[in-house]
Image (tube, rainbow, N blue to C red):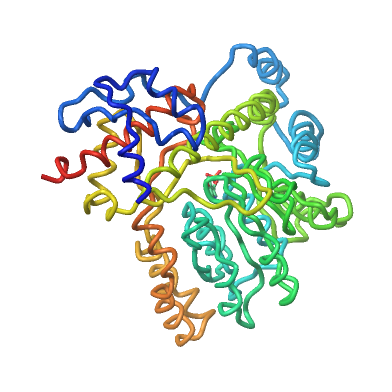
Amino acid sequence: MRNELTRRGFVRSAAVGSAALAWLRVGPARSALAAQPGKPAALGGSPAHAGGWPDWPEWRQSWEPEIIDVLRSGKWCCSGGGGQVEQFEAAWAGLLGAKGCVATASGTTALITALHVAGVDAGDEVIVSPYTFIATYNAVLTHKALPVLADTDPETLTMDPASIESRITERTRAIVPVHIYGMPCDMDPINAIAKKHNLAVVEDACQAWLAEYKGRKCGTLGDLGCFSFQNSKHIPSGEGGAITGNRAELLDRCQAYHNCGRSYGTFKGTANFTRSSNFRLTHIQAAMLLQQIDKLQTDTELRQRNADYLTTALQEISGIHTVRLPENSRAAWHRYAFRYDPAEFRGMPRDKFIRALRAEGVPAGDGYREQYYDGLLDEAIASRGFQRLFPAERLRAYRESFRELRGNKEVCETNVGFSQNVLLAERTDIDHIVDAIRRIQMHSAALMA
Ligand SMILES: *Cc1c(COP(=O)(O)O)cnc(C)c1O
């Protein structure tokens, strides 16, 4: 219906000129008057977008003096000894409004550390979002604990709070909500369930730098929050990570665990008295991160403005289901994603839609797969360790429970998106994305022939 209205309202214009596209910029009420979409590139038209997209990551020469100072100082590590790592920890905690921060070697090692401090041990169970980068599963498996998969809410792409309680057993120790693509999970019900069942909450905020849930930053909403600064992330140092939190006792234990077990703050003792590891960040990486904090803030605002604009335009297109965020929340948009309904595109399969978008110059792709069928979890539950730690009946039921993940399956089958650098482009470039989708829809019969 919406589509018909849109079609009737098209300005009859041979060229998809920028003057016609300017209608789109007026707002949702006027966008029904958008230009007649041009011929799709897949049918020989010229691409909706020809100019490329911003590169990622970005380097600025102005950052170099501070980093070269670190190189020349010979003090390239370590945590606990002041320097850039401590400066970054203070800056990151301050930016997020957290009591403290522990810098780590990666997002994965941040998660491993936080789960240990949250009390996760061999033979435990941890409830996680299935729709995530595989490191979330692996951090749990590293502890020889079982990652029990909650379902995904197709409207939000994040953990469906209603699917958590039925998955709690006497072995459950923690919940790991993932703010996937930088979109905040609905944390209030998740925290309420955790409190009721005495479980820890470790946020996987590895894609959610500066994202906000009801006015508070992701990574400060549970017991501990984990970030990644890997090369593809919004504030990259090649590799790197951080844990944030509001309880000194937990943070001090994170410091100890990631620093070979050395005592820290309220966590007293001598080296080698507690199980631990070496997951430290270097001062060189911390110096890179310190230089990028201002950029992260301005980039985040730009991504948010462009994402809001794009969402408003895409909501006018039938068959494109934009994501619903929790109220009073801001996403960080590591990826811009929506659900695609082939029925509104004359049955065009998702793969073909993605190929047509790429032909238009929009670097679209699908999202995460149903990775619980990829073999990793089968390998884990078949391993000697897991066979010793869990009753066979539990492992069998666990494997069978993947079939209950209907919301997640739907998301895996319908998700389309593109990576964050696209949202750093000019607004007229964002218009090209909308134009590309409209073209494909209008010409879907010809594209399917
Ligand atoms: C990147 C990422 C991680 C892991 O971070 P690394 O720094 O690559 O170890 C964990 N979870 C999510 C959701 C991520 O995107």
- Find residue 437 and report its horizontal and vertical position in percent: 33, 38
Q: Is residue 45 above or below residue 89?
A: above
User: Where's residue 312, x and y in %?
Assistant: 50, 39
Indicate the quadrant where residue 283 lies. top right
Q: Position of residue 180 (x, y in %)?
A: 53, 50
Which residue is located at x 65 percent, y 55 percent? Answer: 203
- 242 relative to 113, above or below: above
Total labels: the figure holds 0
Image side of residue 212 versus residue 446, left or right: right
Horizontal placement of 192 versus 7: left or right? Answer: right
- Is any atom of residue 76 visible in this view? no
Furthest toward the left, the residue is: 449
- As rendered, which of 301 and 84 lies closer to the eye? 301
Residue drawn at x 80%, y 45% as measured from the top left: 100
Q: Is residue 208 rendered to the left or right of residue 375?
A: right
Say above or below: 195 vs 239.
below
Residue 254 image point, x, y percent: 74, 53
Which residue is painted at 24% across and 37% down in the image? 356
